[in-house]
Image: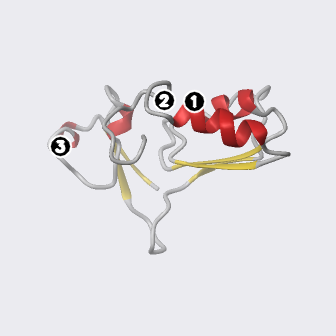
Amino acid sequence: MAFGDSDANIDTNGEAAVIRRLIGAATAPCVLDIGANHGDWLRMALAANPSAECVAVEASRHFTPLSDNERCVAWLTLAVGKTHGWTTLFHWNHCDGLSAIRSHPHLNRASSQEHT
């Protein structure tokens, strides 16, 4: 999501334009997607520059990596933070963008939990 903006639509919040401009113009870029979710952002990056090498990082095992015909150097199922260890991830099936390691009113009814 674009900084300071509540617009999560990649086509209207400026992210798509940045991907096309920066990744599309780069020579063999390495793209790192922290919080890759289902890989939509990476798919757009690969469409902008098919020579990009991509690394996806996503804490939830519920999300499906890119398919075999989509180029991704690595799909890492882990959380990124300042401390090393294990944590509980609350997964919200009806809106996976709300999945988090901290609870909030929506996640008190989380449909599943996993340890990452």
Q: Nearer the viewer, mark 2 or mark 1?
A: 2
Q: Dot 3, crowdedness within 10 Å: few (<14), some or many (≥20)?
A: few
* Residue bearing the label numbered 2: 10
Is 88 placed above or below 63 here?
below
**Considering only order in the chain, which callout, 1 or 2, is on the residue closer to the N terminus?**
2
Q: Nearer the viewer, mark 3 or mark 1?
A: 1
Q: Callout 2, which amino acid?
A: Ile
Residue type pointed to by label 3: Asn
Of 66 and 10, which appears nearest the observer?
10
What is the crowding at mark 1: few (fewer than 14 residues within 10 Å), some, or many (at least 20)?
few
| x and y, in percent, of residue 59 in the image | 49, 50
Q: Is there any visible trace of residue 70 in the rendered image?
A: yes
Q: Secondary structure at mark 3?
A: helix
Relative to 12, 98 lies left or right: left
**Residue 42 seen:** no
Residue 112 x, y percent position in the rendering: 33, 39
Nearest to viewer (mark 3 / mark 2): 2
Residue at figure coordinates x 77%, y 29% from the top left: 68
Q: To which residue does mark 1 refer?
A: 40
Q: Which residue is mark 3?
A: 108
> Do the residues bearing badges 3 and 1 touch, measured as CB atoms within 8 Å?
no
Judge left or right: residue 99 versus residue 71: left
Q: Nearer the viewer, residue 71 or 16?
A: 16
